Image (spheres, rainbow, N blue to C red):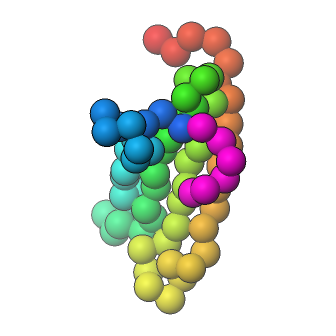
Amino acid sequence: RKDGHNWRKKKDGKTVKEAHERLKAGSVDVLHCYYAHGEENENFQRRSYWMLEEELSHIVLVHYREVKGNRT
């Protein structure tokens, strides 16, 4: 998570404010997903995914994206 980008912080000013989801395949939880938004550019986002299965939990996919336009 220490990737050199400035992410929006929680009210304590220290901890990165992240949303957490568990994504499912069918009815089974299979992935952790954490979402963070940029501090200077709120359209810049980071999404981190990793498997819930213990043998695969060392593999992490990090997705950086910049959302264009207004979301309604």
Q: State the count of labels.
A: 0
Give me the residue at 46% from left, 51% from top. 34
Q: Residue at x 66, y 53 (%)?
A: 3
Residue furthest toward the bottom?
A: 55
List x then y, in percent, for residue 44.
63, 30
Residue 14 appears in which quarter of the rendering? top left
Percent position of residue 48, x then y: 55, 55
Tell me: residue 18, above or below residue 61: above
Closer to the camera in the image, 45 or 41: 41
Q: Along the line of sight, which residue is nearer the eye, 1 or 13?
A: 13
Q: Position of residue 25 (x, y in %)?
A: 43, 63
Is residue 50 one of those drawn in magenta? no
- Residue 7 in sight in this render: yes
The residue at the point 68 percent across, 48 percent down is 4
Identify the main secondary structure in magenta. loop
Q: Where's residue 13, x and y in %?
A: 39, 37
Residue 63 position (above or below residue 40):
below
Residue lying farthest to the front in this orientation? 13
- If the image is split into quadrants, where does the N terminus sit? bottom right
In the image, residue 70 above or below residue 40: above
Q: Does residue 26 show up?
A: no
Image-based side of 36 in relation to 3, left or right? left
Q: Quadrant of residue 65?
A: top right
Residue visible at 50% across and 89% down in the picture: 55
Q: Which residues are magenta?
A: 1-6
* Above-or-below relation of 2 to 71: below
